């Protein structure tokens, strides 16, 4: 299989005067404000990221794309769909297994989130800690689960906007993605992936 990121991720050329020294696009207050690091990767044709932010954005985008592909093929195996030819059923099962095995894992994405957003502002810490406390009392879904679902949806919207040539929408969604990613990083931290502090 060809590299699925090739069409939306590329390394910046350090020998190109137009690409050398570009700043990282991360700037949302919840993500710690403007990232001062130099961009090394371009995503969706317009977004420049430093290595840590690029890794998180790339893993999130890949996770969404593979999950979306697996869901597409898995729909044909729905018990409400008439029985399929056993050969077709076997091939669909193999494709779904391959999609789930080739893409990044949720744990990989959480590790990338923690590397990209290691020190959230105090306001983010308070919001997420309070939210986690409320959800524990109500036994609802965890803030981390809800934030990762939102992040997945944002990545899907960004992919579709990119495919449709809607650069303006990719930029708007990126701002929301940064906020959600930074909050998910801290939610992951307090959920126990690593000690807070």
Image (cartoon, helix red, strand yellow):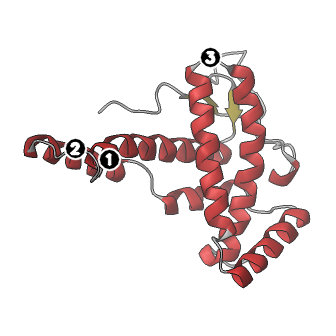
Q: Name the residue that disc number 3 marks.
A: 165
Q: Name the residue that disc number 1 marks.
A: 74
Residue 131 is left or right of residue 86, and the answer is right
- Among the two numbered marks 3 and 1 on one chain, the one whose residue lies closer to the N terminus: 1
What percent of the width, then of the height, locates residue 90? 14, 47
What percent of the width, then of the height, locates residue 18? 72, 15
Position of the C terminus, as image quadrant, is bottom right
Q: Quick one: SS at disc 2? A: helix
Q: Quick one: SS at disc 3? A: loop
Q: Quick one: SS at disc 1? A: helix
Residue 66 is left or right of residue 130, and the answer is left
For marks 2 and 3, give the one nearer the viewer.
2
For marks 3 and 1, give the one nearer the viewer.
1
- Among the two numbered marks 2 and 3 on one chain, the one whose residue lies closer to the N terminus: 2
Tell me which residue sits at (68%, 53%) in the image: 116
Q: Name the residue that disc number 2 marks.
A: 92
Category of crowding for the residue at label 1, using alpha-carbon neighbours closer than 10 angstroms: few (below 14), some (14–19), many (at least 20): some
């Amino acid at each position: 299989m060809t590299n699925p990121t090739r069409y939306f991720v590329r390394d910046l050329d350090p020998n190109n005067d137009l690409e050398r020294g570009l700043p990282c696009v991360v700037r949302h207050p919840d993500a710690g404000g403007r990232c001062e690091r130099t961009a090394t990767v371009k995503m969706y044709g317009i977004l420049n990221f430093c290595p840590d932010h690029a890794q998180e954005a790339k893993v999130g985008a890949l996770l969404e794309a593979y999950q979306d592909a697996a869901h597409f093929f898995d729909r044909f195996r729905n018990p409400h769909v008439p029985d399929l030819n056993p050969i077709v059923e076997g091939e669909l099962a193999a494709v779904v297994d391959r999609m789930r095995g080739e893409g990044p894992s949720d744990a990989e994405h959480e590790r990338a989130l923690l590397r990209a957003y290691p020190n959230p502002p105090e306001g983010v810490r308070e919001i997420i800690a309070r939210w986690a406390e409320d959800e524990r009392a109500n036994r609802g879904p965890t803030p981390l689960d809800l934030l990762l679902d939102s992040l997945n949806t944002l990545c899907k919207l960004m992919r579709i906007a990119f495919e449709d040539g809607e650069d303006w929408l990719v930029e708007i969604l990126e701002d929301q993605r940064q906020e959600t990613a930074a909050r998910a990083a801290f939610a992951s931290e307090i959920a126990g992936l690593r000690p807070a502090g």
